[in-house]
Amino acid sequence: MSAGQYTPGPDRLPEREATTPPANPAQPSGDRAASLGGAPSYPAREPRTPATGTSAAGTSATTAPGGATPERKVTRAGVIWAAVVAALALLILLIVFILQNQEQALVKFLGFEGSVPLGMALFIAAVTGGVLVAVAGGARILQLRSNAHRARVRQRK
């Protein structure tokens, strides 16, 4: 299930289609979900009175009927935004690490020898390790896909 899909919990029933009027009266309500790409339909909100911030039924704008707090929906945009913020924080910490480790370190590898700042040497080693893990993972994914493709071809025969 992707992060953008909504599934009601065991204590909450899904909203009924009949509570909202069809967008197009000529189109039956059963076909409405198919025309919207399977997107869920939500009931219309009750109008709020401007002076008190409560709905016409008397419930507060910050609480759902029954006194519970309203359920927040997780969207793909929200997940992407959180990932970008986390990546930026990680990059800032990485920059601080490299700047604080500027002492020159002697690095020897397969007969090559050089002097590199310590922070940069550790960063290069970490990136190289990540690339090796990604290559190994990619090879395994390709292997699994080819096995799955062969199995599908055998089933068709």
Image (cartoon, rainbow, N blue to C red):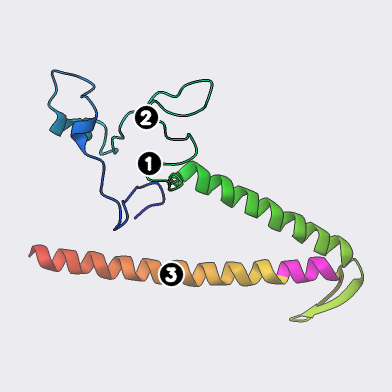
Bounds of the magenta span? 118-124
Q: Nearer the viewer, residue 96 or 78?
A: 78
- Residue under circle 3? 139
Q: Main secondary structure of the magenta part?
A: helix
Q: Is residue 32 left or right of residue 140?
A: left
Disc with the residue nearer the chain's start (1 vs 3)? 1
Q: Residue at x 54, y 21 (%)?
A: 51
Disc with the residue nearer the chain's start (3 vs 2)? 2
Given the image, on which type of amino acid does mark 1 rest? Pro
Q: Secondary structure at mark 3?
A: helix
Give the image location of residue 154, x and y in percent.
13, 68
Q: Secondary structure at mark 1?
A: loop
Say if 117 sits above or below 36 in the image: below
Q: CA distance from mark 2 to mark 1?
A: 9 Å
Q: Nearer the viewer, residue 3 or 43?
A: 43
Q: Secondary structure at mark 2?
A: loop
Near mark 1 (Cα within 10 A), the count class, few <14, some 14-19 or many ≥20, is few
Q: Is residue 121 magenta?
A: yes
- Residue under circle 1? 65
Say if 107 sits above or below 93 in the image: below
Give the image location of residue 94, x and y in percent.
76, 60
Q: CA distance from mark 1 to mark 3?
A: 52 Å
Q: Is residue 34 visible?
A: no
Mark nearest the camera among 3 and 2 is 2
Given the image, on which type of amino acid does mark 3 rest? Ala
What residue occupies the far left of the structure in this picture? 157
- Residue under circle 2? 57
Q: Are marks 2 and 1 in contact (CB under 8 Å)?
A: yes
Q: CA distance from mark 3 to mark 2?
A: 59 Å
Q: Are marks 1 and 3 in contact (CB under 8 Å)?
A: no
Q: Is residue 47 magenta?
A: no
What residue occupies the far right of the structure in this picture? 103
